[in-house]
Amino acid sequence: MKKFGVVTGIAAMAGAGALLIGGTLPSNAAVASSNSQAASTYAKRYFAVSDGPHASAYVPKTWKHQTLGAWQDKFSDAKHNQSVRFNTAYNANISTTQAMKRKIVALKHTRGLHIVSTSTASMKSTSGQGPLTVSTVVYTYRSGKTTRWVADRFIGVAGGKSAEVEIAVAGAPKDYKYLGAVLLNSSRSIQLSN
């Protein structure tokens, strides 16, 4: 049985947004380009509504919102079969690393599963949520005749290490750089109401 742990060094950059794919990282220019694109193609969206919005994040402005359940929301682009999913009340009783390891165990019997990378790192928040602890698992799997690419991230806000938030992006493997930028922007900008 293959053992998964926290990746350190260069792979830890994956947790900070530059996702490790097949041993290579997107160039700094690609990440910078995706960040500059954020101002024009991303918008602050509010979600997890009960008696008022519980959360917000910057996501692609044309993606459609869907409520999945209590504290669970999804924004998707049906044309390209890609999405970002939020769970803003994941599990504050476990660490982000434990949440990532549980996810890997839960994926064990997934058809065509390939774990691409795992990482735990610290990230700056652009929404005043303090330093973020992020643990990310990147994987591919088979859905029918196609391969899907997923990056699932567990986030501890305000300097904490508890897995308070889960953000996952999914789409075609060829779109991993764009999806990585969506995950980076969503992670940095996630804001929970007090």
Image (cartoon, rainbow, N blue to C red):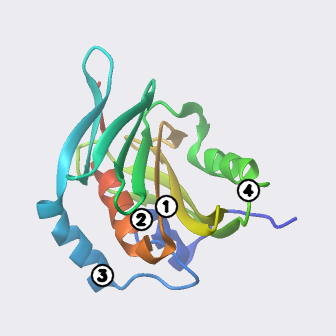
Left or right of residue 51, residue 87 in this image = right
The amino acid on which the numbered mark 1 sits, given as a three-letter code, is Ala
Give me the C-alpha separation between circle 4 and circle 1. Answer: 26 Å
- Check disc 1 and report its element: helix, strand or loop: strand
Q: Which residue is mark 4?
A: 110
- Which dot, 3 or 2, sits closer to the camera? 3
What whole-number distance in Å separates the C-alpha atoms at marks 4 and 3?
Answer: 31 Å
Query: Which residue type does callout 2 highlight?
Result: Ala
Q: How far from the left and from the top, in percent, is residue 4?
A: 73, 63
Sequence order check: which comes first, mark 2 or mark 1?
A: 2
Q: Nearer the viewer, residue 77 or 35?
A: 77
Nearer the observer: mark 4 or 2; the answer is 4
Residues at circles 2 and 1 in contact by the CB criterion of under 8 Å: yes
Q: Quadrant of residue 180?
A: bottom left
**Residue drawn at 30 percent across, 76 percent down:** 31
Q: Write the residue at 24% across / 19% down.
A: 52
Secondary structure under tag 3 reads helix
Residue type indicated by callout 3: Ala
Q: Which residue is mark 1?
A: 121
Q: Mark 2, residues whose alpha carbon is within 10 Å: few (<14), some, or many (≥20)?
A: many
Marks 4 and 2, Cα distance to the nearest angstrom?
Answer: 26 Å
Residue 30 located left or right of residue 88? left
Whether label 4 touches label 2, CB < 8 Å: no
Q: In this rendering, is residue 34 above or below 27? A: above
Q: Residue at x 44, y 72 (%)?
A: 176
Q: Nearer the viewer, mark 4 or mark 3?
A: 4
Crowd band around label 1 with a 10 angstrom C-alpha radius: few (<14), some (14–19), many (20+): many
Q: Which mark is residue 30?
A: 3
Residue 19 sits above or below residue 54 on the image: below
Residue tagged 2: 16
Quadrant where the N terminus lies?
Answer: bottom right
- Asked whether 4 or 41 is in front, the reply is 41
